[in-house]
Amino acid sequence: MTISTEAHKPFPFSSAVGSLIEATDAIKNFRAIALLALTFIGAVLVGGVLTMLAGSMSSVVLAFLGGLMAFLVMFYGSNAVGILLMRDAQGQPGLSLVDAVLVSLYTSHRLIAVVFLEFLIVLAAMIAIAIILFVCKIPVLGPVLYAVVFPLSAIVLGVLVFALFYVMLPLAGPAAWSGASVFQIIARLNQIVRTKLVSVILLEVLLFLITSFTALLIFGVLGTGVSLTTGMSAGILGLGGGQMNMYALASGLGGGSGSGYIIAAGLGGGLLMAAAAVVPGLIFTKGVCIIYLNATRNVDFSASEASLNDGLAVVKKKAEEARERARALAEQATAPAAPAAPAAPAAPAAAPADSLQCPSCKAPVASDDVFCGECAHKLK
């Protein structure tokens, strides 16, 4: 008698839940930790220096440039960290820090395009619903139509917003880090929304709980260690007795003797807290990579990508036809008017009978006269 093992196979969702625990392994990726720390430091230095210069020069443009440069450092640096963690989640060999930054500089702009297109989709849906609501202002028929439009609009907008903030935005990064193009990202996320929206949202809620618990655990461990070290330092080094605590150490506040130790403890404590804050971010980043890989595993996106390409081809064809029509109308409007054909010369009108005269004596003659009756001049 054989026992079937099908009942012992994990369901796809339970397997995905179990794989999320592996997101905590992000704390072992020292390259990602170092790169994220360098990103934070670089953003603070670039933004801080330019902001200080802007303040001394009272330049709004320089202040804006400082904020923009800090954002770009954070954007490309964070995406480089995501590329490292995605390769780790895929089980691929890791990249060096320089290679990760170069790949980020080459591919991260796809995220901006994806986010822009996603907001355009939501905006188009809202405009369409607004037009339908204006139609509902028709007397008598309007309230009847609104009874149907209202619930449908609520469902459409609710699904769009949830899909945007819980699927499109969180998973656009992992899709780009895996090497997908802009339209591949849109097609894949669209299929995930249509087929796995609920499961992805549940996994993201679970990831939030894991990240929060890990953050509490890390800060709890560090808080306990800092408190004990602070007490021992106060007793051995004479740093202010029992008035010192972890917050005073971390902020470098204090006075009296040993102020150099206070400053040193403040610097070290600040770096420690910053490093502790980096870890939850790494866990969340690797977690969304795992969620994306689970959502796309064994899924054929060829139909979705082909449908998107067909739709884009139709839109492109319509745009090309509209462009051709506009060009033809513009050419007609600017072309000079064709010169009118010269009119054929009119045949000379026959002189009326009573106006005929003899060329010799100018006496009136008839059209059938052969000789003039006055001077006998031969007319014909």
Image (cartoon, helix red, strand yellow):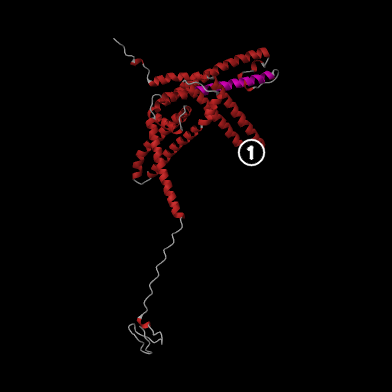
Residue 118: quarter of image: top left
Furthest residue in direction right, as rendered: 257
Residue 157: quarter of image: top left
Furthest residue in direction bottom, as rendered: 374
Describe the element under mark 1 as helix, strand or loop.
Answer: loop
Q: Measuring 67% from the left and 35% from the top, which residue is drawn there? A: 56
Q: Which residue is mark 1?
A: 59
Furthest residue in direction left, as rendered: 1
Quadrant where the N terminus sits is top left
Three-letter code, disc 1: Ser
Going by the image, does 6 lie left or right of 179?
left
Foreground residue, 48 or 107? 107
Magenta segment, which residues? 260-283
Q: Measuring 64% from the left and 15% from the top, which residue is drawn there? A: 242
271 inside magenta stretch: yes
Going by the image, does 273 lie left or right of 118?
right
Residue 376, image x and y in percent?
Answer: 37, 89
Q: Measuring 69% from the left and 19% from the top, which residue is drawn there? A: 260
Residue 63, image x and y in percent?
Answer: 61, 36
